[in-house]
């Protein structure tokens, strides 16, 4: 397993993150356990903010909270002078409860409910990123009722193939997100927005996908969007003040991945926008980007305790852990690959090839197929790296398993930021109808 962020092997052969022994963390907080390297998160945030300040001061970096949203994370993002991207009422509620500045919140989503939009209007969020004609009309009417103007970005589809898994491509014409430039829907939406009394169109948004390594995709997206900005100006006279080019920079999960430095991505985007603005005679728009995975992904690991071991001679050796698809759905969802290590045996050489199985009643609940590890025994602490993005946020109670705790580690300190669920939490919202509460009838 590649050591990322502040990871190192300590003097007793255990994996250590930001001065905290992961084996000790597992013993103190239990497993499965999400561990987030706070200093790694902050370092990446600063790389984004400082690079944009260097190359393009009229810019804003906003964190895509869908990858990992907690009140502590919102506080961290505010401390790093970044905005926040939310995609639901729940994420917005989390941000507001953490006292995140509402005027730096961008509200995304392809099917925001009237209640969610009203929540955004009442909180006076900075921008609503409008996804479709239905939402545009709905928001205009709700803003009228609230006697306000909603400041919006319009999400458009630039038709760029980001060369990533088809589940996480979002910039193509055939997508549930946004309005396509190619078929004229984006232009029509702009014309409608400009005609509405309770809508203030500030600019455009696009997002081409996730886990992107080819920076040419960002160049093509920026060129396409600036070309569209020019076309809109020519057609309507409207000049976009803001251009949100999304996020999606890829991270390291396994040896097949080759992440590009944040600064290279920033240079690619900013130089492309500058060149296009000069070519079209346009003023430079404010550039907004919304990284998420690249901030939280490599900063997280998940700790497990090894349980049963099943060796099928001449076939495969299964090592089962006390978590699985309930805390990491990505391998089952789109065959995501991960690396692993035995946290209490980091100096031991690899001796066997095993497959890491989860505990759910699904044959597809496999975290890693065929990984080389030291001799694994029940009670060992297994660690899987790069689980900071989408793992906690997509966790579930399947098989009525409880969701893990989350710990931030920083400079030798370990702070609980999400408590482990209990069995009582599982039944908290269950209701037994009155007609079923007669015990004699139940036992009949």
Image (cartoon, grey):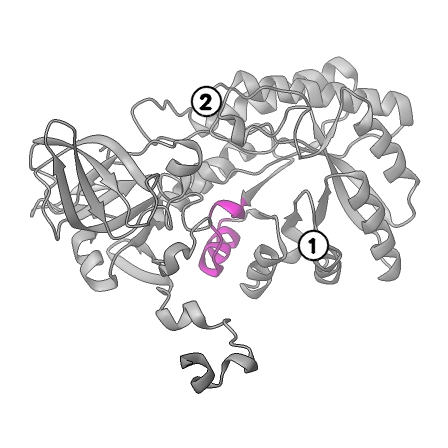
Residue at 63% x, 27% y: name it.
171
Tell which of 63 and 179 is nearer to you. 179
Name the spot of residue 354 as percent of width and height, x first.
17, 34
Q: Which residues are magenta?
A: 64-80
- View extreme (front): residue: 444
Name the spot of residue 269 as percent of width and height, x first.
58, 24
Observer-side mark, 1 or 2, equals 2
Residue picked out by circle 2 = 213
| Relative to 200, residue 191 above or below | above
| Relative to 155, residue 326 above or below | below
Query: Which numbered disc, 1 or 2, marks the residue that appears first in the sequence?
Result: 1
Residue at 6% x, 37% y: name it.
348
Residue picked out by circle 1 = 125
Q: Quadrant of the C terminus?
A: bottom left
Q: CA distance from mark 1 to mark 2?
A: 32 Å
Res 350 visible: no
| Relative to 212, residue 83 above or below | below
């Amino acid at each position: 397993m590649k050591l990322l962020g502040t990871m190192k092997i300590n003097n007793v052969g255990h994996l250590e993150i930001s001065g905290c022994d992961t084996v000790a963390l597992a013993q103190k907080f239990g497993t499965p356990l999400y561990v987030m390297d706070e200093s790694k998160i902050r370092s990446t945030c600063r790389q984004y903010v400082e690079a944009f300040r260097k190359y393009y001061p009229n810019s804003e970096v906003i964190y895509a909270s869908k990858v990992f949203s907690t009140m502590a994370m919102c506080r961290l993002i505010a401390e790093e002078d970044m905005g926040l991207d939310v995609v639901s009422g729940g994420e917005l509620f989390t941000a507001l409860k953490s006292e995140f500045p509402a005027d730096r919140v961008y509200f995304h989503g392809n099917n925001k409910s009237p209640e969610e939009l009203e929540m955004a209007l009442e909180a006076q969020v900075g921008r609503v990123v409008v996804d479709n004609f239905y939402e545009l009309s709905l928001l205009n009417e709700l803003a009228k009722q609230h006697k306000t103007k909603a400041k919006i970005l319009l999400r458009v589809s630039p038709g760029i193939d980001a060369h990533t898994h088809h589940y996480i491509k979002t910039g193509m014409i055939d997508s549930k997100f946004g309005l396509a430039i190619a078929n004229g829907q984006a232009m029509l939406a702009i014309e409608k927005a400009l005609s509405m009394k309770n809508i203030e169109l500030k600019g455009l948004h696009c997002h081409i996908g996730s886990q992107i390594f080819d920076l040419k995709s960002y160049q093509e997206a920026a060129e396409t969007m600036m070309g569209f900005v020019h076309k809109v100006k020519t057609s309507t006279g409207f000049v976009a003040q803001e251009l949100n080019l999304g996020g999606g920079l890829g991270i390291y999960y396994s040896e097949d991945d080759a992440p590009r430095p944040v600064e290279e991505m920033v240079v690619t985007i900013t130089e492309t926008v500058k060149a296009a603005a000069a070519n079209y005679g346009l003023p430079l728009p404010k550039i907004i980007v919304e990284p998420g995975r690249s901030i939280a992904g490599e900063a997280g690991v998940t700790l497990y305790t090894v349980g049963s071991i099943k060796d099928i001679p001449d076939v495969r050796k299964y090592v089962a852990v006390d978590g699985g698809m309930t805390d990491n759905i990505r391998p089952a969802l789109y065959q995501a690959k991960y690396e692993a290590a035995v946290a209490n045996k980091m100096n031991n050489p690899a001796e066997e090839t095993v497959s890491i199985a989860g505990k759910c009643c699904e044959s597809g609940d496999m975290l890693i197929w065929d990984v080389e590890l030291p001799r694994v025994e029940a009670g060992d602490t297994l660690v899987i790296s790069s689980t900071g993005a989408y793992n906690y946020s997509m966790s579930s109670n399947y098989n009525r398993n409880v969701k893990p705790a989350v710990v931030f580690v920083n400079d030798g300190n370990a702070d609980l930021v999400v408590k482990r669920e209990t069995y009582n939490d599982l039944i908290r919202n269950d209701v037994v109808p009155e007609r079923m509460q007669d015990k004699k009838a139940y036992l009949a």
